[in-house]
Amino acid sequence: MRRRDIIVGAGALIGHEASAATMPWLSPDLPDGTRAEAHLVQTPGKQPLIQLSDRPPNLETPIQAFRTAITPNDQFFVRYHLAGIPDEKSLDTWNLEVGGDAAERTVKLTAQQLNDLPQTEITAVCQCSGNGRGLVQPHVPGVQWGRGGMGCATWHGPRLRDVLGRAGVKSEAVEVWVEGADLPAMPGTPEFRKSLPLSRALAAETIVATTMNGGPLPLLNGFPARLVVPGWTATYWMKHLTRITISAKPLDSFWMKKAYRVPAGLFPVAQGFATQDDASTWPITDIVVNSLIATPIHGEQVERSGFTVRGIAWDNGSGIQRVDVSLDGGKSWLSALLDRELSLYSFRTWRLESGPLPRGTAELRVRATSNSKRTQPEVWPANPAGYHNNVPQRLTVKVA
Ligand SMILES: Nc1nc2c(c(=O)[nH]1)N[C@H]1C(S)=C(S)[C@@H](COP(=O)(O)O)O[C@H]1N2
Ligand SMILES: [Mo]
């Protein structure tokens, strides 16, 4: 291992790195350039994560972390669009402004005032829309995520609707706009601004999280408060939340109108986002049903007398109905045993005892089916930004 300095946003962080050769868990399906460039990096407060870029920091969770339904805070992935990310000091004077043309008044809430509102808790998957992009064919530009651009945590804080209630929501409101403390490092780069339909903003499960898995939010995961929108991809889960605008108009921002959009009708949605739809594209919203094998990992040697296959499955909150595993490259499928469900929005762990297998190589595959009867497609529903890759994972192991 070499040591080097990594500059992340305003703070200089000291990191360790390892090369792709020492990272067998880095998916073999990733393009060569990505495998060569990815480093295992340790940033303060985190265990080593796979660094896909450093300004802004984009850090992926190694697959081994998905052996449990809850992803530990120090292994939780990190995604930023803008290089000007806040440090703890700049957040000393933090507060959250809530107002807008469709609000009764403007209020500034301190962290203490958020804590004084009724509190709730939800366990939910935070998944980047582009998770798995690095594995799609043909390759699509953008952060080359393998499978670890996601995590599942128990989020705690007030409901967004109670926060909005402090400002008062007028009847003409249609969207709630959100902004965070991070800023572009270069002039001309659009600020990261997102919005939610009013119905989603008022939903009981949408919260302003101030803690994660019982501890404070890690700085890189949105300290001191972030939006949690269970069932929707993480692009709406604004970190370091500084301003909420209750608006009578749809938000016209680069990150709503140009980015994070998918061809209209290509993916199933429960509710959609009508104020942002146009004839040919929709904003990306619902997470698609997906699954992953966390153990064994690709290339690992396993016992021919039998081994346990373990992993997770998740969707947009309809819940997981079944998980099927193939040990023979898709010729036959076995039903996995599902563990207890932490919440409809969480990772659901599962396991399967392989039984004896012939010596040689075995190709493992996994496929989940949701309660809404959706399953994973054999062919990726291609879209220009490389979103929603839920093609069943394949990996090979050596049976010895
Ligand atoms: N302030 C801020 N919030 C943000 C983003 C960002 O760039 N800035 N990125 C969003 C996207 S696209 C993702 S995938 C998630 C990542 O959350 P994490 O870094 O806690 O894993 O944050 C979301 N919230
Ligand atoms: Mo994302």
Image (tube, helix red, strand yellow):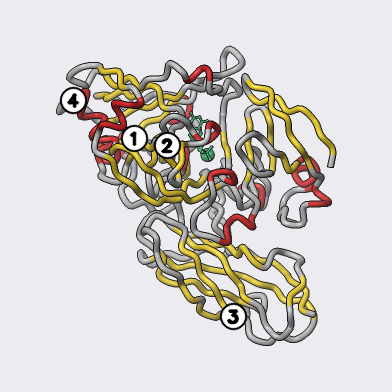
Judged from the image, the secondary structure of the residue bearing numbered disc 2 is: helix
Give the numbered dot on residue 236: 2
Q: Can you say which quadrant of the picture contains the C terminus?
A: bottom right
Residue 280 at least partly seen: no
Look at label 3 and name its amino acid. Answer: Glu
The relative height of residue 157 versus residue 330 in the rendered view (above or below) is: above
Q: Quadrant of residue 93?
A: top left
Q: Residue at x 43, y 57 (%)?
A: 315
Q: Earlier in the sequence, mark 3 or mark 1?
A: 1
Q: Earlier in the sequence, mark 4 or mark 3?
A: 4
Q: Earlier in the sequence, mark 2 or mark 4?
A: 4
Give the numbered dot on residue 95: none
Residue identifier under label 4:
168
Residue 136 appears at what percent x and percent y? 64, 52
Q: Is 49 in front, or is 323?
A: 49
Look at label 4 and name its amino acid. Answer: Gly
Residue identifier under label 1:
196
Judged from the image, the secondary structure of the residue bearing numbered disc 1 is: strand
272 left or right of 165? right
Q: Is 80 in front, or is 29?
A: 80
Q: Are marks 2 and 1 in contact (CB under 8 Å)?
A: yes
Q: CA distance from mark 2 to mark 1?
A: 7 Å
Q: CA distance from mark 3 to mark 1?
A: 43 Å
Q: Earlier in the sequence, mark 3 or mark 2?
A: 2
Look at label 2 and name its amino acid. Answer: Tyr
